Image: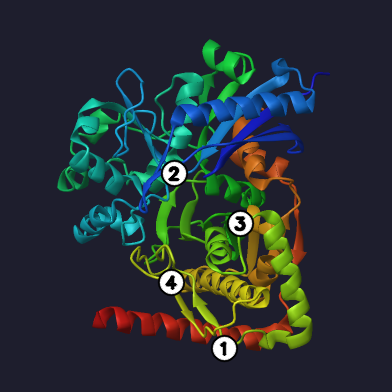
Amino acid sequence: MTQSLLVAVDVGTGSARAGVLTAQGSLISRAERPIVMNRTDANHAEHDSEQIWLAVCTAVREAVAGAGADPANVVGLSFDATCSLVVRDADGQPVTVSTNGEDCWDTIVWLDHRALAEADECTSTGHPVLAYAGGVMSPEMEAPKLMWLKRHMPKSWSRAGRMFDLADFLSWKATGSLARSQSTLTCKWTYLAHAENGWQHDFLATIGLEDLIDKAALPQKASPVGTDLGPLTATAAEELGLTTTCRVGAGLIDAHAGALGVLGAFAHDIKTIDHHLALAAGTSSCVMALSAEDRPTSGVWGPYFGAVLPGVWLNEGGQSATGALLDHIIRWHSAGGEPGPQMHYDIAQRIIELRLREGRALADRLHVLPDFHGNRSPLGNPFALGVISGLTLDSDFDSLCRLYWRAAVSIALGVRHILETLNTRGYAIDTLHVTGGHTKNAVLMELYADATGCTVVESSAKDATLLGMAMVAATAAGLYPSLDAACVAMQQGGRERAPDAAARPQFDKDYRIFLEMLRQRQIIDAMV
């Protein structure tokens, strides 16, 4: 009997990954290709969407070849991607979003912060949509980016005829469908999926985007995650190395795909799903909690209806720079250099040696606030700045290791700050499911347990994000009757790590200092 296979595609900040998986959720083969980024300013970052599509196609072909699979056996495909904004004209051709005017740079990257002022304007409206965005509009969402584009690049705005979140752009390239995912529209475009009329036209008019629906060719209704958007077009099938019998499912934002991969196993028990928190951690970190009812939480994005699982509410917190912060610390320190995997490993090994000698008192007068790129949650302050207290004149490798250790502690304490905020809103989080690049960092994985007091679960899936997208692809292909059923059938379990009770007093003290530093920063900011 021929085995049905699935292709899952995950597009992150720096690369596109493709995996071939079985209908039971086992990853057979994976391939990765880099994507490029253009930086014309510290707050500006752009992608070339055609280069992303080429990277996706190359990765898919390599993954299928690596699996030794017959393309005819691939029955389902789905895409996740960062919440980056792709701008095209009415004919589907690229439109520049870059101040250099080159049309190839048609995508504003999720981490781009050019629209800080516009985000503040959105917040100042006090519109009810903000209750479903954590009360504060982030410059990482699409509305302020679109405002900026219309104001500062009116020629590009006048040329625009289609605008997509990156995951929806990839689905369009694959199928020709202009449908948009409930994940992307609800989380980034101020679409209210729980409301009878999802688009809030009065809000769009208030922020000067009354023409957005037509300009972006947006649908009146979002497509639930896993919806069958149709088969691959002949062109896309040829470029991807697949066939036109392959169905494409409505995808997700990349972090949400990771959440689906690790929390989907609890889809059958929504009443207790609020004990579990998904942490998708790489360059930045997203913290996602699911619940049976909406739980508005200041400084935490959402609640979003049906953004990950049908009928379930999502609250999403995050840290804008985590892996990026540790990379920055390495580059910044005189004993550092290029922050490759070997450098991170060497630092982690030296931290282990230093802790064997100094115990939990290692660098205990050195403290960090990790908000070097703003505080996404729970403060919702994109203008927040990082703080380091306790520096000396030391500049050797050990001093780098101590600073790296304390920066890692601050990242874990930031997660604790978010989950404790969520717990005030009805959650009872005691288990943290981690996926992404941080699972390769032994220092961070230990801290996520000990500094938060949570049991940490690392998925047994070789790639939980690709697993989540395979669940979507399987649903679109009709292998399972619903996304819930696909999640339960394909989940892979995980390895648990309990927090060290002996470490609790040290991290409780660190957390009190962390909160005091936040208070002191607020006082200083008010003075200036």
Q: Nearer the viewer, mark 4 or mark 3?
A: 3
| Secondary element type, mark 4 | loop
Q: Dot 3: few (<14), some (14–19), or many (≥20) neighbours within 10 Å?
A: few
Give percent across and percent down for residue 144.
28, 48
Labels 4, 2: front one: 4
Q: Callout 2, which amino acid? A: Cys
User: Mark 1 or 4 closer to N-term?
Assistant: 1
Q: Which residue is mark 1?
A: 365
User: Visible in this render: residue 121?
Assistant: yes
Residue at label 4?
386
Residue beneath label 3, please?
Answer: 338
Compute the Cα span from label 4 to label 2. 24 Å
Q: Which residue type does callout 4 highlight?
A: Gly
Q: Mark 4 vs mark 2: which is more N-terminal?
A: 2
**Quadrant position of the N terminus in the picture:** top right
Give the Cα distance between marks 1 and 3: 27 Å
| Residue marked by disc 2 | 83
